[in-house]
Image: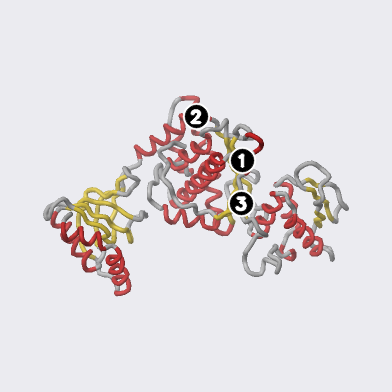
Amino acid sequence: MHRPMDESFNEVFPSAVRPHPTEPPGPWPTGSMTAGGLPDPARVDPAVLGVLLARHGWRRRGGAAGRYSRWTPPGPPGGSTSLLVPDTAAFPDSEDLLGEALTALARSAAPSAREVLVSLAVPSDEIRWWRDVPEPAAGAASWTGSEQLHGAARQILLAGALAVRGRAGYHGARHRRRALATLGSVLIGPAPGGRDLTAFVPVAAGRPLAARLYQALHAAREAVDYQRATGGMEAFDSAVEAGVSRELTEAVIALVRGSEGAGIALEWAPAAGAPDGCPVRPEPVEFSPGDLPALRLAGARYLRDEPAVTVRITGAVVRLRRSGPRGAGIVRLRVLAGAEVPHVRLELDEEAYRIAGQAHLVGLPVRVEGRLESRGGFRRLTRASQVVPVQVDEEERDRLMKSLQENVDYFEEACTGE
């Protein structure tokens, strides 16, 4: 079951997701692990372990009814790994059996064994991506395919994190720092052959991300179906409230491009259950190359129609530039408050430029009003007015002065007018 981003979204952002551990998983919360680095069997729910084993393809092969079950890994039968899992934690030997099962999982060569241990140690919602691509020669994994899958998965996670911060057809640079910080706890597994990839999103920190991504992906699928059936784009407008954005459409395009189809599936952490408003067993969302034109049209529409935002920004002047010793000039601010973007660029008249330059020299931020334009990713402030220095405490002032000393070339530009 497999189903989809445009080259305009090729801005590079640091990977905020951590790689899947290759050693026994850890570290995890104090008290939840044994000295050997495995989940504490006294804290493992046998029912949760059974659900995870079944989810990851392990097969139940009998056992003593009502007492324990035997599980074998995916693949051809006859392997050496076999787990005895008690049906409940109420039996005297339940903890011993769970400990033996966890040790066997840690020693198992099956990739799914590591994934089960990760989900046990940190209750996580699982997000899976897949791409239908031709079989590589001699069974070797495609380097570019694997990179494409990882990149598209990161972009989809980022689009979901941005949607948690706020609904918008185009986010640009807004909320990006906090959205990336949200992804810091996510674990990403390997992508064998560039076909499949799994992310583990801890429930404690990432449940809003997983729930919003579920809603956004299904809304995008429905909007694509509507556009392909009717030619209308109205469904993409209403899908914004569910979390669909240019960032998401571009991410899905990147996932599908060069494949015969791709898809995303979400599965909730068994210990936490389904989020409010989401089904217990969500259906996978699939996209095909035939969906790409609708997604590209939607992305262009979101970029074109997202309105400018009126803001009052407080920021530290980090760069000044003008063509001569007098007249208007360009100023770059590091945003401290007033907008969820790291930096903005604005053009000031001669008097406002002078005020910004003086504030820069003495290490004071400035406050300015204007309109944050969607063109350029909400990094440009137009109609700037009311430029005034802002008093700050000594600690912040010292920090700003240190930043000034570290950027002496900008200081020289302010003085010389170059």
Q: Are marks 3 and 2 in contact (CB under 8 Å)?
A: no
Residue 255 in sight: yes
Label 3 packing within 10 angstroms: few (<14), some (14-19), many (20+):
many
The three-letter amino acid code for the residue at tag 1 is: Ala
Find residue 101 and report its horizontal and vertical position in percent.
78, 58
When asked about the image quadrant of residue 398, the answer is bottom left
| Type of amino acid under label 3 | Asp
Residue 141, label in figure: 1
Q: Is residue 62 left or right of residue 162?
A: right
Instruction: State the residue position of label 3.
Output: 125
Q: Quadrant of the C terminus?
A: bottom left
The nearer-to-camera label among 1 and 2 is: 1
The residue beneath circle 2 is 226
Farthest residue to the right: give it: 64
Question: Given this view, does label 1 or label 3 mark the residue nearer the observer?
Answer: 1
Residue at 80% across / 54% down in the picture? Answer: 83
